[in-house]
Amino acid sequence: MFVLNVVLLFALIFLMLEIKEGLNVIHYIQGNAKSILFVAATVIILTMLTYAYFYFECTEILNELSRIIECFILLDIALLVSYVLGQVLDVNSRPFAFLALMAATLLGRREAVFLNIIYALILFVIDINFTAGEMWQSCACLLISFCAGMTVVFVTPAIKSRIQAVLIVFLLLVPVELIIGVMEVWFVSDPGSNVILLAYGALGCFFSVLLYLVMLPVFEVLFSELTVFRLRELTSDDAKLIKKLKTEAPGTYNHSVVVAQLAEVCATAIGENGELARAAAFYHDMGKLKNPEMFTENQSDYNMHNELSPELSADIIRSHARDGATLIRKNRLPEFFADCAVQHHGTMPIKYFYAKALKMSDGEINIANYSYPGPTPRSKIAAILMIADASEAASRSLKDRSPQAVEELVTALVEERLDMDQFDDCDITMRELTIITHTIAASLSGVYHKRISYPKLKISQKRV
């Protein structure tokens, strides 16, 4: 893929020359062979450095073909758009911060910093060899692309809505206009030209954010990216499955809302993605939509399991994990949600029906027939969901909901799952489990807090 990207970059450079020279492109290449070889060598070296960086610092990107493709597509789009706008309008009107915005949102802060440096260097080399203009302009573009990119890298993770993304335009104006202004003082004496250059700089900031808002949904769909924007869309009341759950299984929906709150605060407390944990929690029990009336939270006074054998009841209950994953995949939702759906019960037994079966049988009962098939949690968020789901359900039956009683309950649930090796396949630590326990206990105490008894007093309009 890296070799292929070098070939694509060469094709991109040829396209840039085609845009600049038109029909004379072959003649231009023959007359500027040294410059073209210099640019080609630079592209090869920087691509090798990119591979080395990912190999030593970010191997998870190298392990996924789609992530490599995503990185290169971002780089190619940023270079092509920047060159075209530089030729059509002005070099200062380029969307210098576009790549950094996209990379920080999709890949992470470290990867965004590195890719922004690679982008700035390649663009600088192209400018000094192919773009007609003064050297100071190329240096200014290098400085702008680096500073604008670094500015948004540290701000982008804090963006939680698309309107906040629009406000980045005003933040970008600070470094861009400052650099252009300083360069103009030294190299441009015409006040009219100064105003025009500053206007082009502001236009470049606008183009960066506009291109970001246009391209981000495309990358979210093409590469199944779970950005904060997409996660919030998937957990809104207008989302298809959420709306269906709310209507057909209101008890499960209310349970999922509380579990989502617990999962979010727990994930944030141990340094995981709180938004992702919250979204996964909303979908973890989607399998209950197949038979919503078979689950306690959706029943009224009558329990349909009274008419069924314990083994059949257990089979219906445990199938909701598998059914949830199937439903999630059918609706083309993120695979991570499906993983959490099948993992949040691990291989835990369904104790109610196992105990019921023991009472009805004289012999031994195979506990595997009354247990979830697994697998056990493979991620910290799936482990959080396992604990939060069990804690929320069990706490509803508590008569004493004091903070101490709730914490004892959650601690017992975590210890039970530790004894049954439910966390062996995820890299969660004992310290993190302790933090999760305290966080859930504190949160549940707030959810199910005591209320004072209202006086039995009728107040009529006359007495008022």
Image (tube, rainbow, N blue to C red):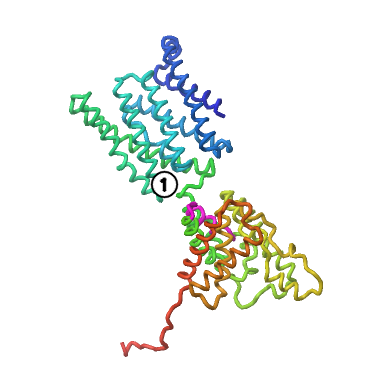
Residue type marked 1: Pro
Q: Does the magenta run of residues contain 273?
A: yes
Q: Residue furthest front?
A: 431
Tell which of 420 and 463 is nearer to you: 420
Question: What's the residue at 42%, 36% (across, down)?
Answer: 113
Horizontal and vertical percent for residue 86?
A: 35, 26
Is most of the magenta stretch helix, strand or loop?
A: helix
Horizontal and vertical percent for residue 419?
A: 65, 62
Question: In screen coordinates, is 215 left or right of 174?
Answer: right
* Residue 63 location, quadrant: top right
Question: In screen coordinates, is 464 left or right of 250?
Answer: left
Tell which of 376 and 69 is nearer to you: 376
* Residue 431 versus residue 4 in the image, above or below: below
Q: Does the magenta run of residues contain 175?
A: no
- Over which residues does the magenta segment extend? 270-285
Say whether residue 208 is visible: yes
Horizontal and vertical percent for residue 94?
A: 35, 31
Q: Residues within 10 Å of mark 1 (few under 14, many from 20)?
A: some
Q: Which element carries disc 1, helix, strand or loop?
A: helix
Quarter holding the C terminus is bottom left
Say whether residue 330 is visible: no
Residue ID for mark 1: 157
* Residue 115 location, quadrant: top left
* Residue 116 location, quadrant: top left
What is the total number of numbered labels drawn onto the structure image?
A: 1
Horizontal and vertical percent for residue 112?
A: 44, 38
* Residue 117 versus residue 393 in the image, above or below: above
Quarter holding the N terminus is top right
